[in-house]
Every structure is written in C-alpha cells, then in structure tokens.
Amino acid sequence: MTFTQTHLLGIEPLHPAEITAILDLSEDYVALNRSAEKHAEVLAGMTQINMFFEASTRTQASFELAGKRLGADVMSMAMAQSSLKKGETLIDTALTLNAMHPDLLVVRHSSSGAVNLLAEKVNCAVLNAGDGRHEHPTQALLDALTIRRKKGRLHRLTVAICGDIAHSRVARSNLILLGKMENRVRLVGPPTLMPAQAAAFGVEVFDDMRAGLEGADVVMMLRLQRERMDGGFVPSEREYFQRFGLDAEKLAYAKEDAIVMHPGPMNRGIEIDGAIADDINRSVIQEQVEMGVAVRMACMDLLAQNLRKTRERARLREVNHA
Amino acid sequence: MSIWFHNARLIDPEAGTDRIGTLLVREGVIAERDGPCPEGAEAVDAQGKCLAPGIVDLGVQVGEPGGQHKESLRTAGLAAAAGGVTTIIMRPDTDPAIDTPEVLEYVTRRAKARTPVNIRAMAALTRGRDGREMAEIGLLLDAGAVAFGDGDRVLRDTKVLGRAMTYAKGLGALIVGHPQDTGLSQGACATSGKFASLKGLPGVSPMAERMGLDRDLGLVEMTGARYHADQITCARALPPLERAKNNGLDVTAGISIHHLTLNEFDVGDYRTFFKFTPPLRSEDDRRAVVEALREGLIDIICSMHTPQDEESKRLPFEEAAPGAVGLETLLPAAMRLHHSEGLGLPALWRALALNPAQRLGLEAGRLSVGAPADLVLFDPDTPFVLDRFKLRSKSKNTPFDEARMEGRVIASFVGGKRVYPEQAHDA
C-alpha cells in the first residue's frame, strides 16, 4: 500500500507515490461520477463532519457530495455562526465533536496551522479544506488531476501560477505538489503579492506577466480578494487587470495548447477576462470542479482504509492483551 | 553566620577570571577571597563546581497584580531561586501597570514577604503604558524603580517619547525601549522569510527592529537620555547600535536567551511555545547576535520570562499569546552558549549579572570583596532532559520541554542566605 497517511493536512507531508495513488484512484471515481449509478459503499457506516470556520460554498458542497456518494453519513456545520462565537475554543469544539465519534473531519479555518492543531486532539481522520494562508491540499490534487488528464502527464511541464501568491493557500499547495512531481513552476504577480523569499521555494519569480507566461503549458490564475485591490497591495482594479489580468493578448505568450485554470470563484474582468474563462478550448475551470468531487472521494476512501486498519490493529492488540 | 566556600571554581565577571579558590561570606557580603577558613564558619566544599554571582534578570513578567493565575510573586521567586536568579527586575506590564508609586510600593511590599530573592521593578514610562502621558518618573525613582519602559508596547508618538527622555535625562533615569517599527510588525507572528512563507504565517522583516532602534537612537542623540534596548535580535540592528556606542551615546542592549539559542525553524509544526515578541529569527541572525554578545556589543542576557497558561497557548499559532517562562531555564540555556558557541563563563556572567547590575546601579553581579553575597553554585556540565511539569513557575510554557540540556544549579544564596534548595526549617 503506497498511501500511508492518517490525515490529509497538506501536500507537504505527501510522497510523490502517494500523490500518484490518490490521482489514480480519483480516475475511478471520475468514471463513477459520470455513470448513472453514482454511488459506492466504501464509507458505509462512517460519519463525516464538515467544519467550516470560514464561509465556503463550492468546497463544502464538493466534500458533502463526495461523502454522500461514498455512502457516509454527512453532517455540515457552519461554524462561523456557532459556539466559537460564544467564546468556545477551537480545541473544545473539536473535543466536543470528537465525542460524537466521527470518522472523517473536514476542516477549514482562517488561521494557518489550525487544522494541524485540531488533528492532534481527535482520533479520526482529518482533511484540511484550507487553513489560513498555509495549504489547501485537495485543491492542488484536483488541479493536478485536471492537468494530468489534459496534458497526459504531470511532470516536466511549465506551470505559471499568477496573481496573489502571498495570501493564497492554493498557490502554496500547488507549488509544493508541482515541485514534488518535477515540474517547472513560475510565480507571476506584483512584488507586493509575492511571499518573502519566494525564489527560495525552487521556483522562478516574474513580475512581468508576458515573460512569465512565455512557453507555459499551464496557466493557473488565482483569485484576488477585493479588499486587497484598493491601494493596499495594488493601486486599483483596472491597473491590476491591465498588468496581471489574463486576456487573449497575454495568453498568446503561453504555448498554443496551454490550458487555463482558476480555483474559483472568479472575478471576471479583474484577474481573468470573461472571454478566456468561457473559452472551451482553453479554459478547464468547469472540469476542475468536476475533478474536485472525484479527488475528495479518493482522499476520503484512502484515509478511511487506513483508519480501518489502525482500528483493527488496536482491536487485535486489545484481544491479545485480554 | 559565615560560610566559607573552598575548592570552588570562582567565576568573576569583573576580573574576567575563572579559577579555583575560596570565598568567605560574612554578614551577607563577600568578606574575603582566597583566605583560610575562619573559626566558626560553615565550610562548604564546592567540589570543583562553579561559584558565580547570582543572575540579575532584567525584564521578568510576574503575574502580580492582575495575572496571578499565570504566575505569582511566590512562584516566580521559587523559580528564580532554583534557576540561580538572585535579582528579578520586574517588567511593568502588570494589570494595573506599575505606573504609580502606590502600585510600585504594593508590589515591593508583597515581593519582600513572598520571595526569597531580591525583586526590583521597572516602572511604566507612560501612564497605563498607553504612550500618551508621562508616568511620575521622579516619584517612582524615589520609590525604588530602577528603569522606565512600557514593556513590549512601543511608544509610537515620538514627541511623547522625546519629552519623556528629556525629563528622564534630568533625573538620570534609565529608559528601556522595545525597538520595533509597529507599522511593519503589525499582525505579524513570524520573521518573514522562506519558513514563514511556507507555513503561511504573516511575517515581519527584521528591518522593523532596525527602524525602531534607529528612531530611538535618534531621540537619544537629541535628548542625551540613558537608553537600553530590551532585545536586539537581528544582524541588521547591530550596525546602528555599534555606531551609537562609538559616538558615545549612553546606550546598552539586551537580548533574551531564546533568541540566542533558538531559531525560526524551531517553530516547526506551529508550536506556540516558540512564539515570541519579536519572533524567532533566522540562523544567520542568531549567529550574528551571538557574535555581538561575544564582542560585548550586546551587553545583557535576560530570560524575558513571560508566563502564559495553557489556554493562551493552545490556539492556532497566529492567535496564541507570545512569550515563554525562562527563570529556571536561563542558566542551562546559557550553558549552550558556553558548550556550543565557546563563550567563556566570566564573559557570560558579565552579560547575565555584572552588566545588568551596573546598568541599573545595583551592587550585585560581582564576586569582589564587599559585594552582596548573592551567589549561585552550579555544575556547568550536568546533563538532564527538561520536564516542563517540574518547573516551579505556575505556567509551564517553556520551549525547552524535553530538550537535552547541560548545567544545573546546585544552590543559590541571597545576602549570604541559602534560598535553594529550600532549607528544611523554611518549609
């Protein structure tokens, strides 16, 4: 068995073989999701709790659907309005939920490392659905699956990640994953939105988008938060679009068959021209969403298998002691 | 009651010597060096272990008043005695702040009754540490304050700070600053760089410390005030510090033991016991400040003892409270500088005892005849693994939990009286 993790907290702890194992299994679930039946029983009897401390629509829906298609009992909690507001700490909330014996916990939180902290305190599998500016592993995995399907491989590709790198967990997870799989990663964006010492990640850094896109196989756009556009990090929306928004003219610098990706939700006319986003020959944005469900099914399936093994070992130990 | 230590490695920071000798304590002071045992004195065979002036720890947070659930004068005193710290200089960041002679007097009185070690206080420079109005510097001096500062709250208004310095200069009071450009450091919990970027933690450039120091030094040059920078932790801040000293400004600098012995990577997987203000620096910075300490550019090592309860630390890294307890781990951690960085014990004791005492105008910190018999007897080589739950501090937030350390305190003496280990009749 190649996949040995007990949690999915980030891409960083994963071995390249584990990434491949997830993607290979995801392919099976892509097929299942396209079939009429759309149902498996691998999580039957298991309880999945989605805890989103930060508002989310698409990621939460994707996890919910993934769990239901695998036969789990799924509960989603909108933590933003819950007891945390009443002063309960993250740990106490986790312990409370832990007492209800969940098998899979899907967590999103606005603080980097919060999901790691939570994973230490519970005895079930924890999936990181995005923590602060740290990681968003399932997004990187679904991006990888999309790239692999479109390009036929996931190595020796030139991938340009463009936009607000500094505040993006999607960028963080993607650059780690693409680096592990031996791709050439470029980060493109204004210096104010570049993390400190970005070049130390083993990537190339560009603040000229045309140079950054030159010869790229994949163009990955990131969402720019509106509150960062009012002069704090970039002078204005229109200046940003002019310099870093993806339009046909800039995309022409990439390879002719380059694909365009975006984790959503998009700001049309700010980081991406609507015409590019809708171009079915270049944009794979809809496919990314489809892959998202399959990848999350694969991750939960693999984690559940390991969880069962761990519990079985614990049970046998007890039997032997008795 | 006299004590005669013999067969002791006497660590004398003033003379810069480290050699075997004898030392006689009589009536609370060091009465004689290298003399014979007088009649009636208790002879203590140090068995070749080190006898040094007790540590003068500049900048200890004691929970009283306002945070007794994290630390009290009693527990801080016990921790200090066990750590070889014979003089605690309290920080004013209590609640209420030590900003009036009344609060100072209250704290001093309670400290006397509850702690076996000497406690002196740094008073707030501004009322409520709010950075707006000067505290009663003159009255606080009369009541025994040894320095003035607002803790890790930076006084942002340069006009207020400039006036306070001018006023303090007239009284000869020492100002303790926390050099940091608050515009840059706001919201940050790590040093910007590859590590912070990878972990997704908001970072601050070490330049913020240099800019804060530059500003403070400008005001020192303008007013002629006596100034001590509480923590200089990065390479970038060293050139302006050196320039100021060469130009004859009355400036000294300190550093916490944590910034001398740990670096940003120690944070690892978001370990909040490694969260500090300022945040831990890169290894390059750490090595630069160790060199600055060796050269005497950085004058004082302190523990920056900051007790935090479990609730304040068991949070996501960005939300967790900064700081660590250090009274009991200061000496063994400083031994890392001795064993791994090759700093001599007399040089270390200049930074741990002599320099802070002299800067604050205290008699302690020396091993000369006539100095108060505040002493620590320790073995620099005893290895041990630290167990945080064995610390005497009420809060157990140490970054050295389960760390392998060398150097243990055998006994501490304050005014010639043994305060650690506790004597049976004290219990």
Image (cartoon, coloured by chain):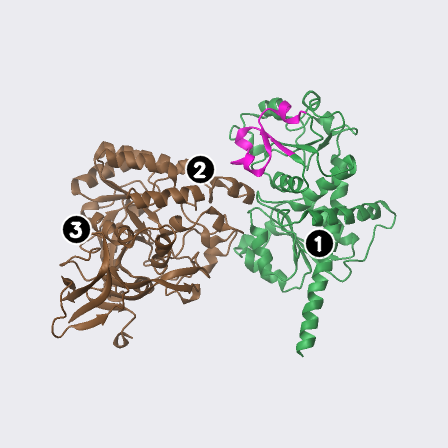
Residue visible at 74% across and 49% down in the picture: A21
Distance of label 2 from label 1 (alpha carbons): 39 Å
Q: Which chain is green?
A: A
Disc 3 designates what residue?
B142
Q: Taking A200 as reference, is B74 above or below it?
A: below
The type of residue carrying mark 2 is Ser
User: Share a chain, discs 3 and 2?
Assistant: yes
- Element under label 3? helix
Visual hue assigned to chain B = brown
Q: Where is residue A274 in the image (x, y as percent from the top left)?
A: 71, 27
Asked if residue B135 is among those painted magenta in the image, a careful observer would answer no
Q: Are marks 2 and 1 on the same chain?
A: no
- Distance from the alpha carbon under mark 3 to that under mark 2: 40 Å
Q: Is residue B357 left or right of residue B325?
A: left
The kind of residue on which mark 1 rests is Phe
| Residue of label 2 | B205
Give neighbour class at mark 1: few <14, some 14-19, many 20+ (Cα, 10 Å): some
Q: Which segment did they paint magenta?
A: A185-214
- What crowding class fits label 2: few (fewer than 14 Cα within 10 Å), some (14-19), or many (20 or more)? some
Numbered disc 1: what chain? A
Of circles 3 and 2, the one toward us is 2
Say if residue B179 shows up in the picture: yes
